[in-house]
Amino acid sequence: MIVVMKKGASADEVQYMVKRVEAMGLKAHVIEGTERTVIAAIGEKREEMKNSLESGPAVDDVLPILAPYKVASLEVKPERTEIRTGSLSVGGSSLGVMAGPCSVEDEEQILSTARAVKAAGATALRGGAFKPRTSPYSFQGLKEEGLKLLAAARDETGLAVVTEVMGTDDVGLVSRYADVLQIGARNMQNYRLLEAVGDGGLPVLLKRGPSATMDELLLAAEYVLNQGNPNVMLCERGIRTFESHTRFTLPLASVIYLHQKTHLPIVVDPSHGTGHTYMVPDMAAAAVAAGADALMLEVHPNPEQAMSDGYQSLTFDQFAETMDKCRAIAGAIGKTIG
C-alpha cells in the first residue's frame, strides 16, 4: 500500500504514520517528493489495515500498489530518482558515462585510461578488480591490488569509481575503495548479495541477467531497496537469444519500457550488449536517443592486448569520437553529460 500524506504534513505526522505502519507488522519506506511525502507500506496486508491507515492524521489517501515490485514502482514514486556520487550524476537532465577497462591489469593501464576517458568527458571510471569468468582458468582480476589502483586513479583524476562486488564477504572491502557497487549479470538473483549491498550506503548498479525478464530485474532491485538503500541503477547489458551475430542481443526498448514502470535510472552497456567494437559507438548513440540515463563503455589503451573483452573495447580515440556523437544527441533531447 501507499500512504499518501497531505501537502504540508509535518515530520512528526509522517513519523507517527511510520510507527502506525510498523505496528501492523509492515515495513515502512518514506519517500519524500517535491510536493508531498508518501509511505510505502510493504508486507502482507489486510483490508482492515487500509481502513485504519486512512484514519491517520494528515493522511490524504491509501492506495494499493499493483506491481509485484513495490518500492521500485513508479506508482510509489512518480518523480525520477537522481543519483549523485562524486563526479557521477545519473538521472534527470544528466547523462552519466562510466568508462574504462573490463579488467584492471596494471598501474599504467588504469591510470592512462582514467586520464583519457576524463579528457574525453567521462563522468566515472569503470574497471574490474574481481572478475567472474566463465572459465576458472581465465584471468580473475587483481582483487584488492586492483581496487587500490582504481582508488589511485580516482585520486589523480577525480573520477568516481564503479567496480563489481562478487560476494557478500567482499562488500566491506570493495566499499572502502568504490563509489558505486556493481552487481554483475551472473549475480542479479544472488539475493543475499543484493541484501548486503542494500545494507550499505553506496549506490548500486544492477546488471540485468542474460535470461532475466523485466519483472525479475525489478524484483532484484527490490531486494536492495527493501534494505533501505534508495540509490539503485538498472543496467541493460543484453540478453541471450537464438541470434549469434552479436555476443548478446541488446534490446533498447528496455529503456523505454522501464521508464514507464520505475523511477530508477536506466543504464545501457553497449559493449557487452554487442560484443563488437565497431557496433559500440552507434549503439551508444542509439541508447542516448532512447532516453538512457547513463552509458557503461569498455575502453582500453590497446584492446588487442587486453586480458579480457578486448574485442568489444574502444581505443582512446574511438571513445573520444563516441563521446562527441553521444554529446550531440544528448543536447538534442535536453540532456548534458556530467
Image (spheres, rainbow, N blue to C red):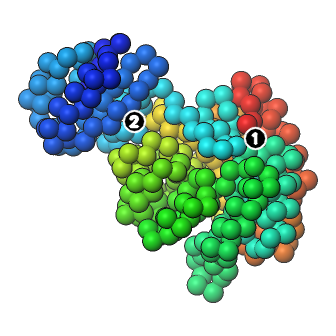
For the residue pair 76 and 244, the one nearer the viewer reads as 76
Q: Is residue 1 shown to the viewer in this render?
A: no
Q: Residue at x 76, y 73 (%)?
A: 105
Name which residue type carries label 1: Ala
- Could you say where residue 249 lies in the image, as x and y percent from the top left? 62, 55
Tell me what residue is drawn at x 65 percent, y 67 percent.
Answer: 147
Give the quarter of the figure containing the C terminus.
Answer: top right
Amino acid type of the residue that numbered disc 2 sits on in the rendered structure: Ser
Residue at 37% across / 39% down in the picture?
A: 71
- Give coordinates of residue 162: x percent, y percent: 64, 56
- Quickly name the residue at label 2: 73
Alpha carbon distance from label 1 to label 2: 27 Å
Q: Which x, y percent locates residue 39? A: 30, 30
Q: Badge 2 local density, few (<14 within 10 Å), some, or many (20+)?
A: many
Quadrant in the rendering for residue 78? top left
The reply, left or right, for residue 112 in relation to residue 192 is: right
Q: Is residue 149 above or below residue 11?
A: below
Can you identify the residue that label 1 sits on?
Answer: 285
Q: Earlier in the sequence, mark 1 or mark 2?
A: 2
Q: Is residue 332 left or right of residue 85?
A: right
Estimate the x, y position of residue 224 in percent, counting from the top left. Answer: 41, 51
Determine if residue 10 is in view: yes
Q: What residue appears at the point 27 percent right and 37 percent down from the top-left corner?
A: 28
* Residue positioned most to the right: 317
Give the total of numbered labels: 2
In the picture, the disc for residue 126 is: none
Q: Secondary structure at mark 1?
A: helix
